[in-house]
Image (spheres, rainbow, N blue to C red):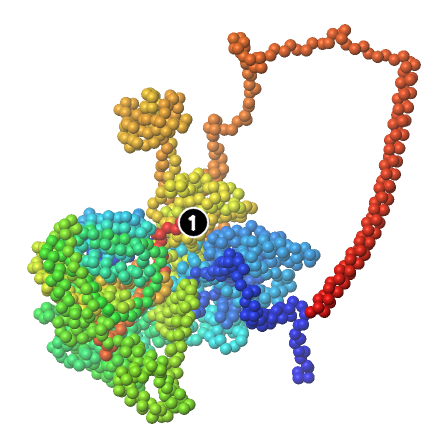
Amino acid sequence: MAALSYDGCNFFRQRLILSTLSGKRVKIREIRSREDEPGLRDFEASFIRLLDKVTNGTRIEINQTGTVLFYQPGLLYGGSVEHECNLQRSIGYYLEGLLMLAPFMKNSLKAVLKGVTNDPTDPSVDLLKATAIPLMKKFGIDGEGLEIKVVKRGIAPHGGGEVHFSCPVRRTLKPVLLTDPGKIKRIRGTAYSVRVSPQMANRIVDSARSILNKLIPDIYIYTDHMKGASSGKSPGFGLVLVAETLNGTCLSAELSSTPQGRGDQMLPEELGKNCAKLLLEEIYRGGCVDSTNQSLALLYMTLGQQDVSKTLLGPLSPYTIEFLRHIRDFFQIMFKIETQTADEDQQKGGDKVLMTCVGAGYTNISKSIK
Amino acid sequence: MEGKEQKRHQHKHSGPKAEKKRKKQQKEHGVEQEQDERKKNPKAFTVRSAVRMARNFHRTQDIKTKKHHIPLVDRTPLEPPPVVVVVMGPPKVGKSTLIRCLIKNYTRQKLADICGPVTIVSGKKRRLTFIECNNDINTMIDLAKVADLVLMLIDASFGFEMETFEFLNICQVHGFPRIMGVLTHLDTFKNTKSLNKTKKRLKHRFWTEVYQGAKLFYLSGMVYGEYQMREVKNLGRFISVMKFRPLLWQSSHPYVVADRMEDLTDPEAIRLDPKCDRTVSLYGYLRGTFLKNKGQVHIPGVGDFSVEDISFIPDPCPLPETLKKRALNEKERLLYAPMAGVGGLVYDKDAVYIDMPGSHVKQQEEEVRPTAELVQSLMGTHTTLDAKMAASKVSLFTGSAALTPDDVQDNSVKQGPVESRVWDPETQRERRKAVFTEEEEDDNSEGSDEEESDQEDEEEMESAGEDDDDDDDDDDDDDEEEEDGDEGSKQQVGEEEKKSKMTAAPPTKRQKLEENGKEVKGGMEMPAFADSEDELEKSEDEEEDKEEDSEDEDEEEMKEEEEKKEKKKSSAPPDSGHCSEEEDDDDDDEDDDDDDEDDEEEEDDDGDDDDDDDDNDDEEEDESEKKQQVNIKTPALKPKKKEKEEKEEKMDAEDELEEEEAELGADTVGALQWKSNLAQKATEAFLKRQRSAPNLRKLVYGTVVEEEEDAQNKDDEELGGLFRVTRPEKNKKVRADAVDCSRFHPDAGHDWEDEEMLTSIRDCFVTGKWEGDKDAATLLKEDDEVYGDFEDLETGEVHKAMGDEAEEDDDDEDEEKEEEEAVVVKFDDDEAKKNKRLERKKRLKERFDAEYDDADATYFDDLKEEMQKQAELNRAEFEDMDDEARIQYEGFRPGMYVRLEIPGLPCEFVTNFDPHYPIILGALGASEGNIGYLQMRLKKHRWFNRILKTRDPLILSLGWRRFQTIPLYHIEDHNGRHRLLKYTPEHMHCGASIWGPITPQGTGFLAVQTVAGTQANFRIAATGVVLDLDKSVTVVKKLKLIGYPYKIYKNTCFVQGMFNTVLEVAKFEGASLRTVSGIKGQIKKALRTPPGAYRATFEDRVLMSDIVFLRSWYPVTVPQLYNPVTSLLLPVGQKDTWTGMRTVGQLKHDLGIRNHPNVDSLYKPVERQKRHFNPLHIPKELQKALPFKNKPKFHEAKGKTPRDLQRPAIIREPHEKKVAELLTALSTVYNYKNKKAHVEQREKHKDFLKQKEKQEEEKQRRLKEERKKVYRAMGQKEKKKLKSSLKGASKNE
């Protein structure tokens, strides 16, 4: 079997993860070959190392300059893993990958990830906790083991956070029929602040509420001020908002303060307001799955039984579009994509996309039977 | 007919049937009776024992739940593939005869040679594929995996043979298909009794193997070399009504049992190298589950291959279309067996014969020689013209592979929009051009052969006229994309394409295409990815068109485009609209129209003062703009114009104007056609415009990245062959190396401060407006109407609910008014109201039913319902799609007749092809093509008469595969350690680790030691199941390290000889030790001298003679041997002679090597020497001290009696002698007399006793009678007394 070949380091995680799940080898060439610093970055190397930790028998070959990567996947092993995530990207970068792999391991995964918990580029751990976990439950991945816990919070750039992620293993996933997102019944959120005044969080909460209160009264935003050892190494604050619907859909938005030394600091009031607006934007996009988790939902649909699964999504993000292409490359699964235009009389935001696919009939080949 | 009276049916009044009927009737009534009884006498039916009751309940529940199977989603397709019926049995049992008879029974046709699979239509909804299984164990294994039904033929005159049992065991391992036994050779029994006995014996043996009550069929005898018609008919009925259960492996893996094989290899390549790898196309019904294109398949007996291409072709043996009639008519009883020559071909060793079948034999699409093609096309009347066209073939040269329209289509399918990268020196970036190879092809052909192309144009025109304008829009689209690209490069590419096409599409094919222009066109539209069949795509295209319509001038165009872009930003959020300009290029897909336009725009902006090339571009655009204006008017002319355009790209603008005029002239020709449905078109166009959604499908899947083009470009960049021009490639590289982040950045256009924006999402919240059927207010109102009040239709009165009036007051006035009105205007809209009410009632009832049923539903029922729903969804989702689109989403459906093209097959597959051996294409799931370590549970088969040795090669049948591997056997210790075993246990499961193909856990496997030839013994060595897959193994074997003490101080001891260096010892510090005598200890510290010696402590003092050992575990590696059994590649007639790696024993036997064992290890006869014991010596002192009892006694041996003590012998005198003799004689007589008298006396006494007994009996009898009398008298007296007393009492009263 010839290896699938790609150019460039974009969508690096997708390729490696799908390769691991499908067992197909992958070759990524010309990774930043024309840049001043060619080759893989540290955070990508760290991601590869993490994959190596959770798998057994993986073969990784990187050339001298780091511009060519050959990846031959092994079997997902799982178990207890401790990983020091690179500080260039937040833990969310790594956690997103693990979320995709975790249900298909041999042993249930118990990962301890250390590094940056919140930064402006990647979806933060809190966001994934609030949106990805309920989504996974819909696919039959539930039970006591499924959990993301923020033990220490570490803000970019110096990190120092710690996150515990555990996930049970499943042999097969259930097909889903998520066509009705339902109405939003409440909005919850967490305003966190570390190594700054605890008042920051309260200021964020007030400003966020000022916008959201116009739409729904049931809003509660927790303030999470961590101190001492669990507060990481850099100061910062931020807000994660989650809108929960009657059908259990979670839409979320987040915003965190600019890392120290990377530009002008944002006022907490401004941050709160902007984050609330982001949430409204997310609600406008709508769908049964949060825009950050689109690819996760699509992956689980692909890896389901050979049954029809349907999910209503908001507009597809560029990341998701590329993910769909990769799914076609690795699993030969194509999605039926139908656009649902919004009703004239109903004020429910923008157009939605109904994704339909027949699962690949994937079973967890790592899980052993006794 | 009327005169003949029909005898009426007489109901049975006696016998088992009548009895049964009566019982049934009684039961029907009895239920009620029983209930009545219970009502009458409830105490008689109370619980007598709670324990008994509980037990009974448990028992019934157990029985009930035992019947449950885990509900599975029903994934059987609507039109299932033919049922695979494998006819199996030892040689000379009558397999071929049975198949022949069955085929004759179903289709009324005789098949001379059963060769390869034979497919027939057996009923209105069922087709059967018969496959004969020979006695090669390879075939048996392969067919057991694909069989739905096995007809197991058994020679009754002989009894069961080993093959039967072997096959049964193979079936058990690979999922158990339905098995029906068929006893043959029953006519050899002359005696009915022995026949019945044999039948019974065989039946019971069969039952123990399969299941109790398994069907065994008897074929009593042969008539003229065939089985009796009636019996065959019955068997046929059994087969056609049989139900099948889904088997796990089969239902999760798509597979094809190939019934036709074609070699597609270039004959020239074969001529040059007869042993070159072959490209082969295999045909067959797809079974199992959905098959995805470009997957991997395993062909048992050959190996793993990747499928180059799959296409579905019309069913050669279709089910009848209408289901009105009771039975199939003659034409619908189809038979399809290309390997047996019924499909038109007869396969011989190295030649192909064409068979001209009888009048009603269905013609298949086998046309290799032109003559046959003609005849067959005339004869085949079942298929429609286009179906036949699709199936027809053309061979260009004699002996070359025939081309089907599929091939043609395939070419076009593969090359949707092909991306060709072109370097634009002006803008310093790479431009990606979508090249549609179909068009290119057309171009080229046009260049070479004008007339033909003209014809084609006409054809296309017609077809386009027939289709609606959608097709033409596609072409427009293409046009645009074409124009975007650079011309020079296009020519370059075009030339290359031309070259390739010239070889691929020869003039003959072209003719064919012309003949059925429409057909081919349909094929060309097939491409799923790019070539815009999608409605959405069309909508967008059209939209663009319309917009472009309105614009006339260049400047305006620019503006328009910008506007459009903005529009898209708002309407199409998923697209790059959110990103900056640069990012636009990265994220966007290569072929997206928007993107292209953006590019153009950029180009226009920067490159105003560029040279001709760019100007030319602009000009072309103008042209296209104009043309599109025209195009809207003349949709039918599109294709032609497009081609012209391409042809004359280099032409001047004037020329083109002329062209246009000419076209306008031609316009009038097709005028009537397009005018016909103008209104409809207009509405459609409007609707499409309404839907401003972007074409997501194309956006997502519309790109095909071509690596080769890229490489080619690089070559072009070379300067003088030494240096290469490197330029920062902005466009592609930035995209490829962008930040990998899943965040979806928000649209900057939305201002959420704005109240209007807020209202746009207001209904997403619970506080917003609800849909009609969910709105609480309307629901409440509805309920009110249903429950609250009702109306008597007869009298016209309106009844109000009891406590309703209070509520009524609260209600709006409107409602009251309504009600009043209802009374007044009731008669007017009575009907409507009635309907409404009925509907509401129905809904209410449904709701009630749902609730009521739910109360009783169990978990099992819920699960079943869920599965049912899923199955319905699966069926309904893609039902109304056409097959071409559907396979994109689902893959190929089971039941389709597919053609798989497989390149790189070894030449032996073709040269040694034997249709008697089944060719199975089993698709492999994700990562099933990889190899790793497998841990399995294995048990030696109880009928295999030897145990298996670790590291002896074994042939495994696992999944689709048969392969040789080297297993290691192990057993799990109590602490989870896998300890290596030298041999498999005799009657126990053990673990086995092998290096082999990754197969899902839970898959069964079987092992044989050899597949070559037939053996007398049972061949299946072991069976088992895969437990675990891994990339490493954890099998260990025990290793004992031995050392000797050389210094001992109390419990401390110095040991040497166990290790060689200090380092080794250091590694084992703290390890536990033991001596042979059983003293435990521990390693303490290494000693410097002698190296490898150490100090150890023990729990007791160790002797110097003792041996110290350390028990350790050493990991073993599993040998990495994975050797697929390539039995199909062997020459014909030797296919059952595959031998792989030999075992050590075989090798030694073959090479004559004998092992010389250690002499000490040999067994020798045990010789026991007699032991001598010394006498016990007790010291004199001790003797003295001992009590007398314990003192040793020294008895002297007894001497002879002295002569004086001996008694003298008596010697009688003669007289005395006589007296003594007389006395003895007398005493003898006396004794005799005495004895006699005694006997007599006893006789007498016996008689006496008898007499006495008799007397006694008599006496007893008498007494009894007397007693009876007395008692009777007494009784009567008593009675009288009682009576009298009663009388007296009554009188007294």
* Image quarter of the C terminus of chain B: bottom right
Chain letter of the residue carrying label 1: B
Rendered view: A229 above or below A192: above
Q: Which residue is more in the foreground, B497 or B591?
A: B591
Q: How many numbered circles are shown?
A: 1
| Image quadrant in which you'd find residue B290 | bottom left
**Residue found 76% across the figure and 59% down from its top:** B1275
Q: Position of residue B1116 (x, y in %)?
A: 37, 39
Q: Position of residue B764 (x, y in %)?
A: 23, 72
Residue closest to the far left: A264
Q: Which residue is mark 1?
A: B963
Left or right of residue B7: residue A249: left
Q: Position of residue B973 (x, y in %)?
A: 40, 41
- Rate crowding at label 1 as few (under 14), some (14 to 19) or many (20 or more) other CA atoms within 10 Å: many
Rendered view: B143 above or below A282: above
Tag 1: amino acid: Phe
